[in-house]
Amino acid sequence: MADTELLNVLGEPLEPCSLKPLTGFYRDGYCRTGKENPGIHAVCIYATQEFLEFSKAVGNDLSTPMPQYRFAGVKPGESWCLSGPRFVEALANGMAPNIFIHATHQKMLDLVDLETLKAYAVDL
């Protein structure tokens, strides 16, 4: 993997999003993306009850456990790698969650401008 694949939106080394629960498309704790990840799971969010309810209502149920996939469900207060298009959808509906910008992959800049991402960052 090239070093540029492990950069956050600030051009710095990508930090892990969550190891418990283990997140990321590759389930390695990082919101990194690649050809195998068409959903672009690149933004590290801070999950709230309000956001989880919104996400479920629009067809992306992150909170219901699915043991068959070793998925315990995301709980309020946890970090999670969210799909970039789902973040854009939440943004358009006024329901975007806060994010951890240092753990958000640079690929998100293809979907959302840096200033908008900074506005939702809790780690700046």
Image (spheres, rainbow, N blue to C red):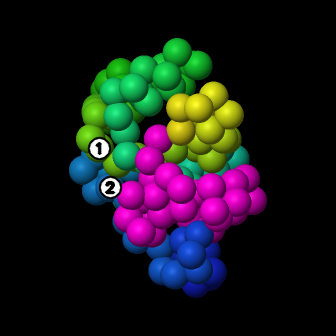
Q: Which residue is mark 2?
A: 18
At label 2, which amino acid type do we have?
Ser
Q: Secondary structure at mark 1?
A: loop
Mark 1 touching mark 2, by CB under 8 A? yes
Q: Image check: 8 left or right of 52? A: right
Q: As rendered, which of 5 and 13 lies closer to the eye?
A: 13
At label 1, which amino acid type do we have?
Glu
Q: In the image, which residues are magenta?
A: 97-124
Label 2 neighbour load within 10 Å: few <14, some 14-19, many 20+: many
Residue sticking out furthest to the right: 110
Q: Image check: 54 left or right of 122? A: right
Question: Residue 45: x percent and y percent?
Answer: 44, 48
Residue 1 visible within the image: no
Q: As rendered, which of 31 and 93 lies closer to the eye?
A: 93
* Residue 104 within the segment the image draws in magenta: yes
Figure check: 73 above or below 96: above
Question: Residue 75: x percent and y percent?
Answer: 28, 33
For the point 50% across and 52% down, which residue is it? 120
Q: Secondary structure at mark 2?
A: loop
Tell me how far mark 1 sits from mark 2, CA to CA.
8 Å
- Tag in front: 1 or 2: 1
Q: Which residue is mark 1?
A: 78
Circle nearer the N terminus (1, 2):
2
